[in-house]
Image (spheres, rainbow, N blue to C red):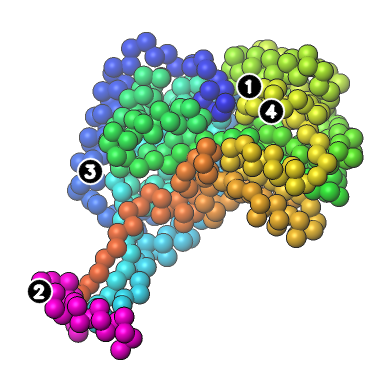
Amino acid sequence: MSILEAAPEPLIAAADESDAIAALHAAFAAQRAAFAADRMPSIEVRRERLMSLIGMMAANRERISAAVSQDFGAHPVPASDLIEVLGVIGRAQHVLEHLEEWMTPSERHVDALLGTAKAHVQLQPKGVIGNIVPWNFPFDLSVGPMVDMLAAGNRVIVKPSEYTPACAALLAEMVAATFPADLVHVAVGGLELARAFSSVAWDHLLYTGSPNVGREVMRAAAANLTPVTLELGGKCPAILTPGSVTRTNVESVIGTKIIKNGQMCVSVDYALVPRGDVEVFVEHARAFMAAAAPNYSNGDECTGMISTRHLDRISEMLSEARDRQARIVTLQDDETVDRVTRRMPMSLIVDPAPDLRVMTEEIFGPLLPVVPYDNLADAIAGINAGERPLGLYVFGDDTSVTDGVLASTTSGGAAVNTCAIQSALPSMGFGGSGMSGMGRHHGIEGFREFSNQRGVVVRGEGDMIDAFYSPYAKAAGLVQAVLSGS
């Protein structure tokens, strides 16, 4: 279970999307033609486009916050500003600082047999790139990757989530007012448009969502041999090594968990805690919430669930755990669920049975299983028995122990003594491994992801290239000389 499966009731209808699909194909054709006329935009042009993007985000800051709040029912304004606006602007500023360096061809070693030849790798634009955006971060995951795509010289078409109609409409308006449609276009529609989107002959396709939908996207893309970047989530663990259950570390885990009310693909999905420290963990969690967000689900710090169906799903997970005699620790006095704003309290589920839904599905909500362990090696083995997570978080002051955990596990990204920050650094490639995804965006890795890394050789003098031609008598002599060391 992940992003697109977690809210299975689209808010943009899909009754008749023929016009939206026709508009998508028209925009794609226009961008293809525009790319054919300008296959290698200059650095000045790319910088201008990125500056326009920054201006677009800054000018619409308040409207972005209002749209996010409308779609989620409730959303902290500072969180929208920090993540959806400033995060994107910071990403663009980082790229602007390094764009000249990244665009410079990278020289490669040339064997002596090629004489004075020169070789380099040239990063050229791929062409027209599609981006299927999830509902949980409607601007960060639409405009954010657009930074990498435009920096690499591409043209972009974005498909916002059908679960965030206010954000989708605003994004389409913002983009249309900032960029020509043959450079950036936003395709707004429902599930039929999403299916059609995957089948377009993109030069690259980015999808963020669930593994199940990711398979369908990859299958559709394969018909056109379209390369894909898939960001798919997973159950991200936080491992508190012996001696690390401190106030600061527990605050990091719980503080991360309540970002977007748990609706984040790199959120902590469960915490592995030494059995003797479970009560300490619980008390630190209580103290943090009491100080940072008393009456959390009734205040301005809490984001609403994206839909009533998703709220019900999280509530059913909690009820199942309670029915199976798991210990439930609600981190506020008022346990009321507000169905109008779709908000519910943050709860710990202590020592859950391994077959509960909270342990077998990605949660995507304000529930945190606290799983005791007796031996760190067993905790690591449990992680490795599952699918590779998108993020893995390890806490401890002994670097030999934390390094050992990192060396013994595989994940898309990781963090030590903190959580999720690896996904927010503009300089660091972000992506998954195995079932949590493939490919990277952010930083130079994102620039390369959306570039064709073309190898170029310029012939010089004094080479032996003709050894590759018939007759091969010269090649035979050359091989003999190399093997004999002469």
Q: Is residue 300 left or right of residue 45?
A: right
Q: Which residue is mark 4?
A: 359
Could you tell me which secondary element the residue under label 4 belongs to? helix
Residue 62 appears at what percent x and percent y? 56, 33
Q: Position of residue 297 (x, y in %)?
A: 75, 23
**Could you tell me residue 138's position as x and y percent?**
51, 32
Q: Nearer the viewer, mark 4 or mark 1?
A: 4
Q: In the image, is residue 482 part of the stretch drawn in magenta? A: yes
Q: Secondary structure at mark 3?
A: helix
In whole angstroms, how far apart are the C-alphas of marks 4 and 1?
20 Å
Question: Distance of mark 2 from mark 4, alpha carbons?
Answer: 66 Å
Q: Where is mark 3, residue-wise?
A: 34
Q: Earlier in the sequence, mark 2 or mark 4?
A: 4
Mark 1 or mark 3: whose residue is earlier in sequence: 3
Bounds of the magenta segment: 461-486
> Which amino acid does the dot numbered 4 rest on?
Met
Q: Secondary structure at mark 1?
A: loop
Residue located beneath label 2 in the image? 471
Q: Name the foreground residue: 233 vs 102.
A: 233
Q: Amino acid at mark 1?
A: Met
Q: Which mark is residue 305?
A: 1
Q: Residue drawn at (29%, 39%), measured in percent from left and top?
A: 225
